[in-house]
Image (tube, rainbow, N blue to C red):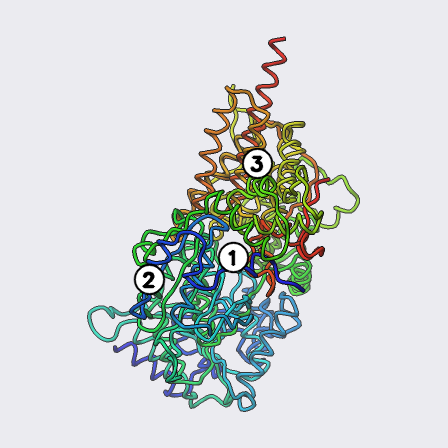
Amino acid sequence: MSVLWADKYRPKELSALDYHKEQAANLKDLTKEGDFPHLLVYGPLGAGKKTRIMCLLRELYGPGVERLKMETMSFTTPSNKKLEITTVSSIYHIEVNPSDVGIYDRVVIMDLIKHVAQTQQLNVNAQREFKVIVLTDVDDLTKEAQHALRRTMEKYISNCRIILCATTISRVIPAIRSRCLCIRVPAPTEDTIVTILQNVCKKEDVNLPLAFAKKIVDVSNRNLRRALLICEACKVEQYPFTENQQVPEPDWQIFIRKTAEQMLQLPNIKSLAKVRQNFYELLTNGIPSEIIFKTLLEELLKKCDRGMKTKVVEEAAIYEHRMSQGNKAIFHLEAFAVKFMYLYKNMLEQMVEVY
Amino acid sequence: MESNKKWRSFDFGPPHSNPKTHNVSKSKTENASPEKTTVNQSVTSNKLISDTVSGISKMPAFDFHQKLTPKTVSELAVHPKKIQEVESWLQRYVVSPEQNMKRSQFLVISGPTGSGKTVTLNVICSSLGISVSEWVNPIDQDYEIKGQNQISQFMEFLGDSKWNSLFDDCAKKITLVKDFPNAVIHRPEQFFDILEECSYKTDNPIVFICTDSNSSNINLVRMLFPDDIMAKYSIAHISFNSSASTLMKSAIKRAAELIKERTDLFKQPSPSTVDAIIASSMGDIRNTMNQFYLASLKDTGEIPTIQSLKESKGVKRKKVDKDSKLKGMSKDETLGLFHGLGRVLCPKREKVGNSWRLCHDVGKLVDEFAIQPSMFVSFLFENYLNYFGELTDVFRASEILSICAVLLDKWSGDHEALIPALWTAVLGLMVFNEHKVSKWNQIRGPVKLNKSTQRSEAASGLCPTDYYYYNVVTKSSKFHKFQFD
């Protein structure tokens, strides 16, 4: 099977990066001494966080870090529950997403770091005396796990470095933020994405009209990886590209739009039950709760008049804030949905009274 | 110190008039409580029983409880599976320990009060020829001032228990701890130290019996045997359930047989009274027997019972008439999860003047589920929609649940702080349900959000929001497709 364009044309060295060149130079300087502090890399989806981390590791260890293998590690919780988690590792580093195991993430973090840190590098030819642990989606970790991480970070600093990767640092506890060097990777500008798309297409021998590239960038929401994926998906659907070709929308976005439509059509308890089921379906399939919330709000606002809009946005802000603080997203999503239905129903009733 | 010595000398001293009671060392204090007496009785030999049986005609006194205490395994009002569990543990670790290289020397038996934990252990031990020595908190000395403190005495007792008594003909023995030293309850760490010491000092099996309790600060099992301790010393755990009504029925039948002999003292209680006794005892066999004893005394009239107005309509439900309950002396009821959910989701109200109030005591309801607040709240969240009739009510209730979720998340480390959160949810749901829908609804468990971790080599760098494009590009349906119907 062919490799996705997004993976195929991923820059492998800091010097080969397409944008944020100044930051790349800084990162290069950082590793000059052969050592670096714990890092916390954050930024929106598809901005190139992971790419930069891998480039950094390559800078440190050489091409050996690119020889990756997938492994399933198993852990046992104190209550004797078996956990399995997929890790991606080279001989120099290991990459895990601890929030895959939900509330047991604390166990994974503690055991994994201990495991990695306690095995000293035996190989004399090893270039560094520490290993690197890359933890992704750190903002999804539970509070307990974050506190555990804080303690283990200090304890094993001598023979391991931790690189954390998150979309937002507002949910990362301050204790961790202060122990890391925070690096923000902003999303690339639209023009940059257009240039990158054109470069990739040239290498693939595909003709990409400028207008169509702009259309893709509009849908991609300044997410470079998504832009590349959309471009590839369009090519699969219809090639050569035409000016007025449809750019496919992700199915979950349509799913949320339909859910919003149902809420507007029948604001009652029965449709609420259906709405909840839809939320569950979205969440179990990994769509982040903030994105569900945001998309839903945007869809709902389309049908509101001006007076209603401010009210809805105000309420949304309250529930979104609550949601970002805890890990029970469904409670707040539903509470917002009910609140909206309640407001909307009242508005409809008032309108009926006026006429 | 002195009295302590005296107890010791009891073991080594001249044979007692009752040759078997030395099994239970420190039996002096035993007689203090009636339950301890049963401990004694179950280990006593057949000779002693025949003594009392022959003595009936002479003595007008009739020791109902002594006679009733089960002597054989078949007489126990405990589920056969549980009996078997206890027996197999004893078989494996006490009777033939040589076959087991890795020894588990601790056993914890837990269960609600009156579920037959102690009696089961004693009956099985006597049938297997194992002697039981039990720790009893010393009460008759000022250990604070002179001599050892309670903890070191406890330790000494556990250490000494590996020596067989001189008058004991059976080589197998276990130590029973039911009466935990008070100091241990305040400082569980001390208890962990004791366990540590025991684990290498003696290899004599020790059985701990803990009574379950609803309130979290005196829950011995959770406090003294947390998960990591259980795992560290590989402690076996057998948890008893409260007696089933069928088992209690047969126990009452047996009791009825026993009292037949003494028509001068007893009468047979009416079947309806028996049913009421069983219904109101909430699975406590000891309580049942006490009520039965009272009901069968000759001079007492019918025990007043409460008949609920609602007669059971269905044919199916007539099996156990749970509607009639004893008026006095009934235990506090313990609610099951489903019962508790029902109370919260379908709140009953009574009119008081122009206002109304809730029929059930909310505080009690909250206490009942105080051990796992977030579990109970998830259950409420999952099911509350079905019981609400108006969108306005739902809006208020969901707001409450949302606040509750915030509280639960914020204070997840501090158990005590979670109780107000549970209060918020329970009270909110009960008060705001103005237009309740009473119909049969299936209770659903909380949905577990297991993120499907279908990562693979090719898609390792992808975010779930981009899976759709992956499906399109590779023309596969590797990832979930959202379809609205």
Check whether the beta carbons of the residues at disc 3 and disc 2 lie within 8 A of each other: no
Residue type at tag 2: His
User: Mark number for residue A102?
Assistant: 1
Q: Is residue A260 above or below residue B217?
A: above
Q: Is residue A286 above or below residue A354?
A: below
In the image, B137 versus B457, the foreground residue is B457
**Please, which chain is the residue tagged with disc 2 on?**
B
Crowding around mark 1 (Cα neighbors within 10 Å: few <14, some 14 to 19, many 20+) is some
In this figure, which residue is indicated by the disc labeled 3?
Answer: A296
User: Which quadrant is the N terminus of chain A positioned in?
Assistant: bottom right
Label 1 amino acid? Gly
Both marks 2 and 1 on one chain = no
Q: Label 1's element?
A: helix
Q: Nearer the viewer, residue A44 or B473?
A: B473
User: For mark 2, what is the residue?
Assistant: B186
Query: Where does the C terminus of chain A fall, quadrant-wise?
Result: top right
